[in-house]
Every structure is written in structure tokens, then in C-alpha cells.
Image (cartoon, rainbow, N blue to C red):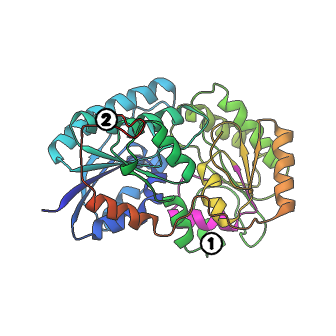
Amino acid sequence: MKRKICFPITNRAYYGRSQLLIKKLHAHPDLDLDLMLGGSILLDKYSRHIADDIEAEGFNIAASLFNVIEGGNHVAMAKTACLTALEFTNSLHTLQPDVVVICGDRFEQLAIAMAAAYLNITIAHIEGGDVTGSIDESVRHAITKLAHLHFVTNADAERRVRLMGEDPRYVFNTGSLDVELASNARTEITSERVNGYGVGPAIDISRPYVMVVQHPVTTERDNREHLETTVRAVAALDLPTIWFWPNPDAGTGEMADRLRHLREIHSALTAKMRFITNVPAEDFVAMLAHASCLVGNSSAGIKECSFLGTPVVNVGLRQQGRLAAAHVAHVGYGSDEINAAIKSQLAHGRYAPSHIYYRANASQAIVEVLASAQLYTQKRFFENGQT
């Protein structure tokens, strides 16, 4: 009998970075893969047509669950997590998978992990043990304590997962799926393709341009002001800019409102900025590869850009403590500080590729474990060599 794998996808970024893994799980002769869609991936304003693209790939979508409470604030975020637990509990109970694969540190993924744990389903967690600067870190570690199989991206993360009392036999340093995708993705892209996304002035990617990906920090209350300082710092460069819309965490509402206000009332600040909501993963990697600098607080700056050698200015605390290579300059929220760091990175130019997150065939290593590992549901704290 084939082992049944359930892969919940609740975020545009997780689908993009997991594509190689999903394809290999789907093709494995001993595995039966079911996808469950939910969260922002079903909302057109964040992930337009992605659900259609997933279905067109031939994957089995076992459930599409509308579990998002709109609002973009902390109350909506907490209620979305609660609704996620309710909706996914019903579908997991019906589907009865052998393993549920949970990615990263999203609050929806924590709710799904909780539901799976109470249903006595083995949980496999990808990207445990990383350190970040917001509530995401707490969520990530909470998922680790619910999970049974751990696929980490680096040696430091492996050490932390073991320190949390996880059995070393079930902790696997497979490297980063994001970086594996970046290492395999085509980096050729045309200006016409880039300008087919979003709104704003056309970007000539044969010339220097800046990319910005700045998400809300859920443990801070001044995301609006932090966004505006970044806008002013980038605008002062007088360079073409590709600006990606923030993700749907608490704080996104005020950030989105501020971006719209700046575009409409202070259009001189955004005159060279093209705003994009979502692009296919390979096009995102290609844009990163051609960018002169990435600015903001996305993990893409820490991980994918480490392999691509793209200079990064990491703003604020969202990625605080995460393992980073020499290509990252960390700055606070001051506009002058951000502007000066970008200029320094532009003057430096591209960096040599780093392999701190890279391991060849990361997705295949995960597939092999999921297909062959002895599954269990009752966890024990592992301490001093004993459980």
C-alpha cells in the first residue's frame, strides 16, 4: 500500500519554494500525494490564478478551504488560525493521511500541525530550528515540538532542534528548498515579462534596478512608519524599483493603505516604482538574480540571495538572528541609514555565491525519508542520549 502524504499549502511563497519537492512526491511510486489549499493562496489579491496553475500541473487537490478572516490585523490573524484548525481538522479526519508536511513558520501551518497532532498523524516539519526576529520564531519552535520528522536547512538549525529535545534519529539536515530552487531555476527573463506583472512604470532589467520585499513585523506596532522610511530611502536613489506587495500577516492592512496613499498623494516618491503582488517562483528568482540590490525583510534576501550573490539590505528585526552570509547588510529603520547601506551595496556589486543554505538535491533527500522512515506519533523528550 502506498504511503499517503498530505501537503497543505497556505501561502504563495511556500508553493513556489516547494515545487521541486511536490513534483518528486507526486512522481514517487510508493507515495500518494494529496494537496490541501487554504489561506492566501486562494485569495486573488495575493495569489491570483495560482490554484489554477497547481491543478494544471496534475496534482490532486484533496480540499480547498477558505479559512482567512480579512482585516490584516492581529485579531484577524488570531481568528484565521482558529478557523484554520477547524477547517483542516475536518479535512484531515476525512483524508486520513500517514504524514502531514508542514513548512516553515506561518501561523496557519501551526494550526494545521496542532490539528494533525490531535488526530495522531505523523508530522514532518521543513525549516525548523531557524532563528528570526518576530513571533514567527515562536511559531516555528512550537511546530518543531509537535513534529516527528525534521528537515532543517543548516547545521545551526539542526543543533537547535536537537537542543529542544528532538530525537537525532529524526533530524535531517537537507538544506534549503528555496536555495535548491534558485540553483535550478532559469535566470533569463525579459523586460516585457517583468512588465506584464503589476502596475507602475516599465522596468528595463538590462539596467540597474532595486527590488523591495518588506513584510509587516507582527510584534511591532509601527509597520506603517517603517514602510514609509523605506519608500523614502529607496526613492532618494532615483533608480527603477520593483516593489512586491506585503504578505497577509497582521499589519499588512496599514502597510497596503500607506503604499496606496503614497502612490496617490505623494506620487513623486513612487514615480520609478513598479508594484507587483505575485509572480511565478522562477520569475521571482530571475528578478532577484538580475537585481542590483534587494531591500526589505524577506527570507529570500537571506537564503536565495546567498546563492545568487545578490547584495541585500535587511531592514529591521524580522530576520534578526537568522544565519546570513557576507552579502547581507543589516540596518535599522532610519531612512538615511537604509539609503546609505543601499548605496554601499550598489558600490560593492555582486558577491561570490555562498553555500550556507545549499545542499544538492535537498528535495530528493526529503522524499527519500518520507518514503522510507519508520512513522510514529507518540513523542518523547530526548535528553542526554535517552528518551
In the image, which disc is placed on residue 380? Answer: 2
Q: Position of residue 300 (x, y in %)?
A: 60, 54
Measured as percent of width and height from the top left, residue 299 is found at: 59, 49
The answer to which of 231 and 127 lies nearer the viewer is 127
Label 1's element? Answer: helix
Task: Specify the farthest residue to the left.
Answer: 1
Magenta segment includes 284? yes
Instruction: Please identify the quarter of the rendering in which residue 312 is found.
Output: bottom right
Say what amino acid the circle numbered 2 marks.
Arg
Whether residue 238 is visible, yes or no, is: no
Q: Nearer the viewer, mark 1 or mark 2?
A: 2
Quarter of the figure that contains the C terminus: top left
Which of 111 and 83 lies nearest the eye of the viewer? Answer: 111
- Residue at 30% x, 58% y: name it: 370
Q: Is residue 342 above or below residue 83?
A: below
Q: Residue at x 26, y 61 (%)?
A: 372
Counting from the top left corner in percent of width and height, residue 349 is at: 81, 64
Q: Residues within 10 Å of mark 1 (few under 14, many from 20)?
A: few
Seen from the viewer's position, the closer of residues 67 and 36 is: 36
**Which residues, given as a range, are shown in magenta?**
275-295
